Amino acid sequence: MTTGTAVVDLDGVLYAADTFAELAIHRYRRSPKRALAVAASAPRLAWAWHHEHLRPDVLRHLATRAVVGMERSAYDGLARDLANRMANSSRVAWDGVAVLRGLCDAGWRVVVATASEHELASAYLRGIGLGAVELVASQLDPTAGRFIVHNHGAEKVRQLGFAGCTSWDLAYTDALSDLPLLARAARPVLVNAGSALVRRAAERLGAEPEVVRWGTGKRW
């Protein structure tokens, strides 16, 4: 019998960086022509970046341009390789991993809901010993260079519903874009949040969320 349900973000929560951004950077560093092609649109992207509601579109553009043209098998191999490196890096939030393992052991349903790409996120979770938790992630067509599903913001709630997860007791995130997740949680929790983020979240939620500090530390 399930004791409770916890929905957890990945980037900035279980990994102290953006997993898919690291994959994109890896690709750009190894392809100057690809980087130059994106640089040509820098003025437009810079303008969009100054408008907060357009930032997800900028990040999506940069991410998909990094992988466009890759065969699925080549992309999956790269994603697994980089995820393994991330899982063995100093950026793993082992405090968070321990919390989630404790919830699983206590009979909770734990679902990681992330905007990161599915193969990359899945391989990372396996690498840190959380391969058994459920995963709801973005779906990518690397050859076309587009997201079939970009699991970001309110889309996370919709995709969780498709996975049969329509209510949750706990929600862990470090981002205001996950306010739809926090708003539905009995206990909304911000991870490693500063005072400004806590204040903005409280204004939107109507109550101050709980704050926890999850460090990287050493592997248990």
Image: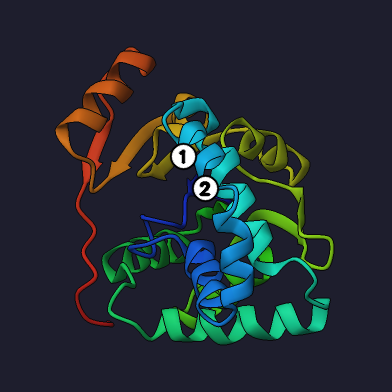
Q: Position of residue 215 (x, y in %)?
A: 21, 64
Residue 110 shows up from this direction? yes
Q: Residue at x 39, y 44 (%)?
A: 173
- The 10 Å Cα crowd at callout 2, few under 14, some 14 to 19, many 20 or more, is few
Left-right relation of 160 to 148: left
Relative height, residue 220 to residue 115 (above, below): below
Q: Residue type at mark 1?
A: Ala
Tell me whether the residue at label 2 lies in contact with that at label 1, contact meaning CB atoms closer than 8 angstroms. yes
Q: Which residue is mark 2?
A: 42
Element marked by disc 1:
helix
Residue nearer the viewer, 84 or 164: 84
Residue nearer the viewer, 92 or 144: 144
Relative height, residue 13 to residue 94 (above, below): above
Q: Position of residue 157 (x, y in %)?
A: 63, 34
Residue 1 shows up from this direction? no
Q: Residue type at mark 2?
A: Ala
- The 10 Å Cα crowd at callout 1, few under 14, some 14 to 19, many 20 or more, is few
